[in-house]
Image (spheres, coloured by chain):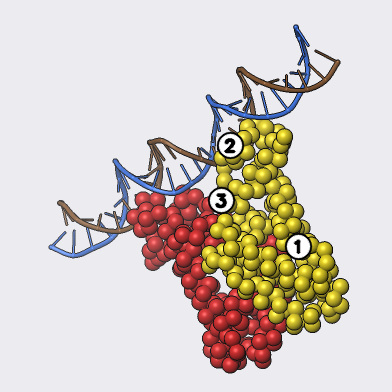
Chain colours: A yellow, B red, C brown, D blue
DNA sequence: CCGACTGTAGACCGATCGGTTTCCTGTTCG
DNA sequence: CGAACAGGAAACCGATCGGTCTACAGTCGG
């Protein structure tokens, strides 16, 4: 039995990603099968719900992108970009949810923006840990560069409305080679 | 004497970038000093105005990013990333207008998305021309990779709400080095 | 002075916005 | 059984949405 809270977070995660944070509270509650009354008892405002739904969605997002245990640091890093490539093949792909939400909100102080910043940093931390394990000279810089490639690739897929077709993997590979992470 | 059309396009370009395409037609017309009647005589719909304002804004955007005549291909390419770095230092920076609009609209068939695609391709074409002039083996791939870095860097500045501090330039430099564009 | 034209001001339309409130049904627990 | 409580349905609030339309002021060429 799912709780109203779970249904709200799930519906919000999907609707806000698919149609943007401009989706109305009425439509959202209808999709979740929850009354507005309950929604406003569970969340202080729509803005808090946006932030909470992004926070909820992020672990699933990580699970899709991050590699299972094992493999070389290089393979583990490239797994992220291969997984992203797969995501961009879906017709429902609308870019990285974290970046998309931050972009739409236009407000660095919005609670959802802190969520996006935190989870994006987690990806960078993963890259940095792999780079460090591989003995790269400047793991933090490489990690930041890989994150840039990740977000740039997702932006490209959105603007061109087509899959990446290996461009993200190729660009990440070039950076790994340049940093000596073989 | 500016025409109502010019005032509308200017106000739309600024407001839609600063606050998002959710800005209402009333607020927009008030900011432009144009009546709604005139707006709807000049444009078929708000969507058309979004597309037209993006198209209008793009040449100015190019002028800020692209280098003046002269210089080596490497310097000319890096000029773009240095200019971007400067843009991210402005507190009003909200990411690349083309990517931000495409991300907000969530609709690949929206007229503004075609505008974004076309102008983003123009930047890639610039990169490709420089790469070709430098005799790079695969200029189109390098150009696509540089565009990825450009858009990823702008996304980073938005999510982190801080300037790039050289990360875009450094990442582009690594790719230029890897491609042998010295 | 006259009509034609341009453009602003703003009322108006039905729909929807975020948010609050009332009402009522179902369940649970003492 | 009955009081407490959770939660859905929906009315309601003032404001705003995209879009249309009327009314009127200003500026033309004749």
Sequence-wise, the earlier of marks 1 and 3 is 3
Residue B89 appears in the picture as rendered: no
Tag 2 near tag 1, CB within 8 Å: no
Give residue B4's quadrant in the image. Answer: bottom left
Q: Which mark is residue A66?
A: 1
- Residue drawn at (81%, 72%) of the image: A73
**What is the number of callouts on the image?**
3
Give residue B170's quadrant in the image. Answer: bottom right
- Judging from the image, mark 2 belongs to the subunit labelled A
Left or right side of A181 for A53: left
Residue placed under numbered mark 3 in the picture? A19
Can you give x and y, in whole percent of width and height, for residue B147 in the image?
A: 60, 75
Residue A60 appears in the picture as rendered: yes
Kindly state the secondary structure of the residue where label 2 is placed: helix
Around disc 3, counting alpha carbons within 10 Å, would you say few (fewer than 14), some (14 to 19), or many (20 or more)?
Answer: some
From the image, state whether disc 1 or disc 3 is nearer to you: 1
Left or right side of A40 for D5: right
- Residue drawn at (64%, 69%) of the image: A152
Sequence-wise, the earlier of marks 2 and 1 is 2
Above or below, comparing residue A129 to residue A58 in the picture? below
- Residue drawn at (49%, 63%) of the image: B113
- Between the residue at mark 2 and the residue at mark 3, the CA separation in whole angstroms equals 15 Å
Residue placed under numbered mark 2 in the picture? A30
Badge 2 and badge 3 in a common chain: yes
Kindly state the secondary structure of the residue where label 3 is placed: helix
Kindly state the secondary structure of the residue where label 1 is placed: loop
Above or below, comparing residue A164 to residue B75 in the picture? above
Can you give x and y, in whole percent of width and height, for residue D19 in the image?
A: 38, 48
Sequence-wise, the earlier of marks 2 and 3 is 3
Give residue B165's quadrant in the image. Answer: bottom right
Can you give x and y, in whole percent of width and height, for residue A179 in the image?
A: 78, 81
- Between the residue at mark 1 and the residue at mark 3, the CA separation in whole angstroms equals 26 Å
């Amino acid at each position: 039995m799912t709780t109203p809270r779970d249904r709200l977070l799930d519906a919000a995660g999907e609707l806000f990603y698919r149609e943007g944070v401009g989706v109305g509270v009425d439509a959202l509650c209808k999709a979740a099968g929850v009354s507005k009354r309950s929604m406003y008892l569970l969340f202080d405002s729509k803005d808090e719900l946006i932030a909470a739904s992004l926070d909820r969605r992020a672990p699933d997002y990580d699970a899709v992108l991050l590699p299972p245990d094992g493999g070389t640091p290089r393979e583990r890093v490239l797994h992220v970009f291969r997984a992203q490539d797969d995501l961009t093949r879906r017709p429902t792909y609308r870019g990285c949810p974290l970046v998309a939400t931050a972009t739409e909100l236009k407000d660095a102080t919005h609670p959802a923006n802190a969520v996006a910043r935190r989870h994006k940093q987690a990806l960078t931390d993963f890259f940095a840990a792999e780079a460090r394990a591989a003995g790269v000279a400047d793991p933090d810089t490489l990690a930041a560069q890989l994150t840039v490639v990740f977000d740039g690739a997702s932006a490209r897929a959105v603007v061109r409305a087509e899959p990446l077709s290996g461009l993200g993997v190729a660009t990440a590979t070039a950076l790994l080679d340049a940093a000596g992470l073989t």
